[in-house]
Image: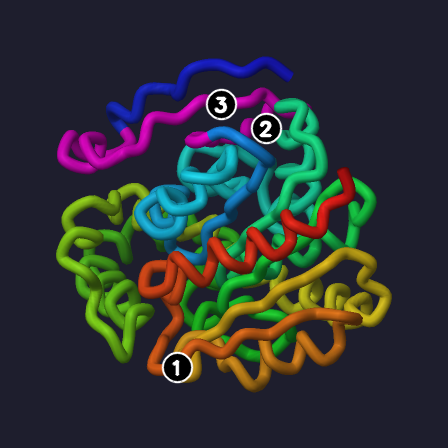
Amino acid sequence: MAAGSLVSPVGRVSPAVSERLVPRSTLDLPDGRTLAYAEAGTGAPVVVIHGTLMTLEDMWLGPVPRLAEQFRVIAVDRPGHGFSRRRGASDAHLWQQAALIRDGVRALGLERPIIVGHSYGGAVALAYGLQFPEEIAGVVALAPICFPEPRLEHLLFCPRAAPGGHFASRVLGRAMDPALLPLLWNAMFLPATMPPGYAAANPFGLAGTAEQLVAEGEDAAGLMSGLTRSALSYQACRVPVRILAGDSDIVVSTPRHGYWASHRIPGAAFTLLSGTGHMLHHQHPDAVLGAVRALADHVPA
């Protein structure tokens, strides 16, 4: 599994979007898959995983700077997103995404990292801990989706994963997505507004390509089965888990997901952040750092 430079974004995104990209390296995984990542800081390893309609820049613009003051932080593009390549819908299952990220972690030689994930990435982080409990120091799940339910993503994106969905996604990319996607990105920050610095720096055009939205459809199509498997496994979880969620999250219901999962996972700690919506890692990076430090302080020497 060799590491190399990021493939050129020319032809995939506009020059304006390319200017916003965080420099990445790539790992070659089996069967043509790749894992793109960026890292900062030194110390004990922390792996951070972004959520839906995002790339690693979302975490990079949120908690990574604070985490990198004390830890070696590796931010990844989830398989099939950003510059990480996967092999179709079979790799979209959140447990498989966790396994592919684990392949990258092993290739980098990281020893017992803490896994941090936001939203869908929080579900992937929990699946990582459920599958490979002996290999990590714990999981920090930020506004995670934890249990199966019908969701807006199924309506908006699942049709793009159907036969002919690539063509449909290209058509929608010209007709509907330019109006729809900004609404979704801004809604994630409610009741707050998207910070101007974030709006100027995040490469939305990378996460919003027709190809990426097909991947979002594949993720959504497999979400029910993946979360069902997770929900049935929570009571057997053997890693320390800390869950952070906002009391005003309109994207992922905190009572139905993070709060309830904390009662199903043995020993899980739950923190409710007042006046906070889905993008809590941008409003409260110090809370994320505190959760990671709490796990790191209990890692056996």
Q: Earlier in the sequence, mark 3 or mark 2?
A: 3
- In the picture of the structure, the residue carrying the numbered disc 1 is 274
The amino acid type, in three-letter code, at marker 2 is Arg
Q: Which residues are magenta?
A: 12-41
214 with respect to 65 (left or right): right
- Viewer-side residue, 264 vs 42: 42
Mark found first going from the N terminus, 3 or 1: 3
**Of labels 3 and 2, the one closer to you:** 3
Q: How many discs appear?
A: 3
Mark 3 surroundings: few (<14), some (14-19) or many (≥20) residues within 10 A: many
Residues at circles 3 and 2 in contact by the CB criterion of under 8 Å? no
Q: Residues within 10 Å of mark 1 (few under 14, many from 20)?
A: few
Where is 89 relative to 123, above or below? above
Q: CA distance from mark 3 to mark 1?
A: 38 Å
Which disc, if any, is residue 107?
none
Q: Which residue is mark 3?
A: 26
Say if the magenta span includes residue 13: yes
Q: Quadrant of residue 209?
A: top left
Disc 1 element: loop
Between the residue at mark 3 and the residue at mark 2, the CA separation in whole angstroms equals: 10 Å
Residue under the point 61% across and 60% down: 123
Asked if labels 1 and 3 touch by Cβ distance under 8 angstroms, the answer is no
- Mark nearer the viewer, 2 or 1: 1
Instruction: Name the mark nearer the viewer: 3 or 1.
Output: 1
Q: Amino acid at mark 3?
A: Thr
Residue 21 shows in the view = yes
Query: Toward the viewer: 235 or 209?
Result: 235
Amino acid at dot 1:
Ser
- Please identify the quarter of the rendering in which residue 264 is found: bottom right
- Mark seen at residue 33: 2
Q: Evaluate whether residue 211 shows in this view.
A: no
Residue 98 x/y as whole percent: 66, 46
